[in-house]
Image (cartoon, grey):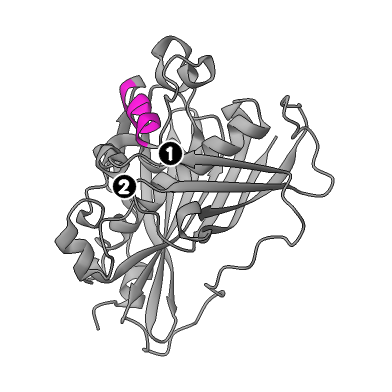
Amino acid sequence: MPIDAAGALTAAPRVREIAWDHKDVQLYHLGIGAGRPATDPRELRYTLESRLRVLPSFATVAGGGVPGVIGALSMPGVDVDLAHVLHGGQRLRLHRPVPVRGRASAASRVVAVHDKGTAAVLVLRTEVTDADGPLWTEEAEAFVRGEGGWGGERGPSARPSAPPAEPPDHVVERAVREDQALLYRLTGDFNPLHADPEFAARAGFERPVLHGLCTYGATLKAVVDTLLDGEVTRVRAYGTRFAGVVYPGETLRVRMWRATGADGAGAGGGTGAGEVRVAVSAVERDDAPVLADTVVRYG
């Protein structure tokens, strides 16, 4: 069996040193669609080094290393075909704001292997620590088609839930550039699924798709800009489940619901803590779901 669950779970953490600076942050922001309009003061805080703020989802690419899902496939006990792998979900918890420049240690290990019958789900957790202590913790779920059925634990349901029935508090739309995936690849995720039409066809897609983590970052930016007045340091945690793909050139519709009792989530950016539920869909495909079970917690 290509996945040795016991071997993956008992393997020692893989530790690597990572470093980044303002150029890496700026490239990431451009990769998720920041900088439009280029002279907008609200966009310059993502693109101009003298005003630079770090969107917390930058943590997924900090150091330019192998991204979570691809990283999970290189762990001991795992040997699968990349064309059979989908990104199932992503979770991020911030211990401190992400600095514009940093040097840290990233320790990654597989913390769960679920048997879904026709597929397997790997959960890779990465703990990032610098000289001052923990910076962030992230978890990536890799859904591997055709690798289940060995009798392991099924784990939690992987089926995304429906968005809230009531109308959203805010709706914004974000256009995805035709070359967005080609630009985002430069942050370190060179999976050919996002650039090579032949590889995309082998994986079952009509053409290359946008990176799920690009949609993940663009969605967080929409929430931060809409509800937190661009105050990136207020984000405490962010998680999502990938419910569908985005094709470059499409439009994202981002719907936001403030949690009952949430404080400080007004358009002017209050100072309270709260939670926002989010659902993202592709406008041109009759609002086909893209991100589900998405929650942003802020303080």
| Callout 2 crowding tier (Cα within 10 Å): few <14, some 14–19, many ≥20 | some
Residue type pointed to by label 1: Ala
Magenta-drawn stretch, dominant element (helix, strand or loop): helix
Residue type pointed to by label 2: Val
**Residue lying at 84% horizontally and 45% vertically, measured from the top left:** 261
Marks 2 and 1, Cα distance to the nearest angstrom?
A: 16 Å
Q: Which quadrant of the view contains residue 292?
A: bottom right
- Magenta-colored span: 23-31
Q: Residue furthest top?
A: 50
The local secondary structure at tag 1 comes to helix
Q: Does residue 118 appear to the left or right of 223 in the view shown?
A: left
Percent coordinates x, y for residue 10 in the rendering: 36, 69
**Residue lying at 32% horizontally and 65% vertically, measured from the top left:** 11
Q: Which residue is mark 1?
A: 59
Q: Residue furthest left?
A: 198
Percent coordinates x, y for residue 195 in the rendering: 21, 51
Q: Which residue is mark 2?
A: 15
Which sits in the foreground, 244 or 262?
244
Does residue 136 appear in the picture of this structure? no
Residue 227 belongs to the span the image colors magenta? no
Percent coordinates x, y for residue 48 in the rendering: 41, 14
Quadrant including the N terminus: bottom left
Tag nearer the camera, 2 or 1: 1
Compared with 111, 220 (above or below) is above
Q: Which quadrant of the view contains residue 266?
A: top right
| Callout 1 crowding tier (Cα within 10 Å): few <14, some 14–19, many ≥20 | some
Percent coordinates x, y for residue 149 in the rendering: 37, 89
Q: Residue furthest right?
A: 261
Which sits in the foreground, 49 or 127?
49
